Amino acid sequence: MTIKEVCEKYDITADTLRYYERVGVIPPVTRTAGGIRDYRDEDIGWVENAICFRDAGMPVEMLIEYVKLFREGDSTIDARTNLLKEARETILEARKKYDIALEKLDYKIGRYELAQKTDVLKWFDDEEDKK
Amino acid sequence: MTIKEVCEKYDITADTLRYYERVGVIPPVTRTAGGIRDYRDEDIGWVENAICFRDAGMPVEMLIEYVKLFREGDSTIDARTNLLKEARETILEARKKYDIALEKLDYKIGRYELAQKTDVLKWFDDEEDKK
DNA sequence: CTACAACTTGGAGTTAACTCTAAGTCAAGG
DNA sequence: CCTTGACTTAGAGTTAACTCCAAGTTGTAG
């Protein structure tokens, strides 16, 4: 699979794919005889992981560390497990913040919609959005 | 409430609080006669909102837009409602990505813990983490 | 009244994560 | 063989969101 096909499939730029490989977010990608990237299943797997964890806010630095440990072999399984558990906690905490923001948003949207329909916003004594 | 008390309360730096005010993420904060910030309840409310939505990944640019509309008065209620609904969709989608990453993480952690206990990782044929 | 810490501003600097540019190489169609 | 478009690299540039700095002001304690 060419770099173009991969970036179309995952809606990511070729520059980003090359950047991920260059800094070690993914291991070196399989190449053709001429040196052109030929993404094989395992390369795609790493790309998918990278996108998935970046989308969940994991820093590039942590992905690089994971790939580095992975490439060092089975002796790093403990370290990798710890890294993943740490990542899990980080993502759980971040998601909690998303839930809080959603609650606040739903409350605000509800109040605005009420105001639009009944024009009574000004008589409410909201604990937010004064001033 | 002084800037110091606010940043201790919300675990945020004074520089960030001043930056938020300067660029318009929050409206101008109440000042003492001498020009020193004196955060009143409504200022604190805006700070809380800013932190909450930034924690949920909303860009500073969007918070600025919301505050700008808010300060333009009631005629912008429609626009603000739309902004909030858009934010809601964005956050929902982001949260979905967090859930996907968590699933993937739990799967990987499970496999690593199994490997640690039974040393059989190598005989599994995992669809990820080859190479 | 004098220290002295905490505050103020404008503006420059930093960091993470891309994103772009230049100069060149590879490969498929004619 | 030649063109043409997609690929390659090294390295510079950009963007968002802070973060720091210098020089000056405020306000409290002695």
Image (spheres, coloured by chain):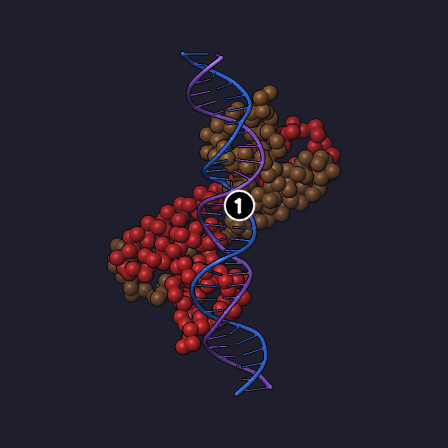
Chain colours: A brown, B red, C blue, D purple
**Closer to the camera in the image, B90 or B96:** B90
Q: Residue at x 60, y 26 (%)?
A: A30
Q: Residue at x 60, y 20 (%)?
A: A33
Image quarter of the C terminus of chain A:
bottom left
Picture coordinates of residue D9, whole percent (x, y) = 58, 32
**Residue B38 visible in the shown view:** no
Q: Residue at x 52, y 62 (%)?
A: B13
Picture coordinates of residue B24, whole percent (x, y) = 39, 59
Give SS at disc 1. loop
Tell me the amino acid under the disc marked 1: Gly
**Closer to the camera in the image, A119 or C1:** C1
Q: Is residue A99 above or below residue C23?
A: below
**Residue A33 visible in the shown view:** yes
Q: Chain of mark 1?
A: A
Picture coordinates of residue B6, whole percent (x, y) = 50, 67
Q: Is residue B98 above or below residue D23?
A: above
Residue assigned mark 1: A57
Picture coordinates of residue A4, whole percent (x, y) = 48, 27
Left or right position of D18 against A75: left
Q: Is residue B101 above or below residue D9?
A: below
Rate crowding at label 1 as few (under 14), some (14 to 19) or many (20 or more) other CA atoms within 10 Å.
Answer: some
Q: Residue at x 48, y 42 (%)?
A: B96
